[in-house]
């Protein structure tokens, strides 16, 4: 069509004006009598769209936790703990694969290690007043766990290391934690 005259205020949605515009061969022949009503343009997104945006936001921050720097991972975990509760997760069951025992244990271990790294990156978290949010209270409790000290001598494999207090078990625990840090927080 060479000329299209539209009254957008009389339409109930955005689909019919789109079809009308797609029929025009050039913009020179398009005439709009009245613009859209504001409520047609600014309506609330559907529940499915809102859930998808929440899921994408959660996945974005989980990706940063897994592949970002230590500071980025700490910030992403803080955001996830503050923004998403455990009640939000059952809505997303279809996106999570069937969990096996090892996956759950590995996830708990990664969360503990990440919480410890957060505590190392921001020691001022202990001075914050307790929050009313159960997620924040849980995080504060995790942050207050005793941190393991890492000697600067342990970084060089050529030097002989003296066993710290607690014997070989402490050395094994420290090596395990260092391995986990290297594996998950590059």
Image (spheres, rainbow, N blue to C red):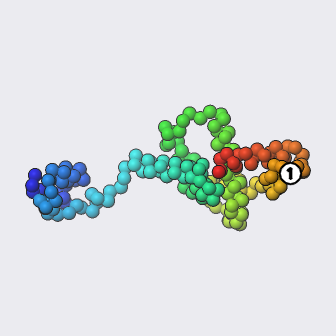
**Residue 126 horizontal/vertical position (percent):** 71, 63
Image vertical order of residue 11 relative to residue 109, above or below: below
Q: Is residue 184 left or right of residue 146?
A: left
Q: Residue at x 19, y 60 (%)?
A: 9
Can residue 86 be seen in this snapshot? yes
Q: Residue at x 22, y 61 (%)?
A: 36
Q: Is residue 75 left or right of residue 147?
A: left
Can residue 112 be seen in this snapshot? no
Residue 179: quadrant of the picture: top right
In the image shown, does 155 or 2 lie closer to the viewer? 155
Q: How many marks?
A: 1
Q: Is residue 47 left or right of residue 126?
A: left
Q: Is residue 136 left or right of residue 28?
A: right
Give the labeled residue for mark 1: 159
Q: Residue at x 35, y 55 (%)?
A: 44
**Residue 22 horizontal/vertical position (percent):** 19, 51
Q: Element type at marker 1?
A: loop
In the image shown, does 60 or 67 lie closer to the viewer? 67
Image vertical order of residue 99 relative to residue 11, above or below: above
Image vertical order of residue 169 relative to residue 21, above or below: above
**Residue 120 horizontal/vertical position (percent):** 72, 59
Q: Residue at x 83, y 55 (%)?
A: 153
């Amino acid at each position: 069509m060479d000329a299209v005259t539209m009254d957008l205020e009389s339409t109930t949605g955005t689909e019919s004006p789109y079809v009308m515009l797609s029929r025009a061969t050039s913009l020179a022949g398009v005439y709009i009598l009245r613009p859209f009503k504001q409520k047609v343009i600014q309506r609330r997104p559907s529940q499915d769209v809102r859930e998808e945006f929440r899921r994408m936001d959660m996945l974005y921050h989980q990706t940063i936790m897994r592949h970002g720097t230590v500071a980025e991972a700490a910030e992403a975990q803080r955001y996830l703990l503050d923004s998403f509760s455990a009640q939000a997760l059952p809505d997303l069951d279809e996106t999570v694969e069937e969990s096996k025992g090892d996956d759950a244990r590995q996830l708990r271990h990664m969360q503990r290690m990440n919480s410890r790294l957060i505590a190392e990156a921001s020691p001022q978290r202990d001075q914050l007043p307790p929050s009313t949010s159960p997620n924040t209270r849980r995080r504060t409790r995790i942050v207050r766990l005793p941190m393991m000290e890492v000697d600067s001598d342990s970084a060089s494999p050529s030097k002989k290391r003296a066993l710290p207090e607690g014997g070989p078990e402490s050395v094994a625990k420290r090596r395990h934690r260092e391995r986990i840090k290297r594996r998950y927080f590059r």
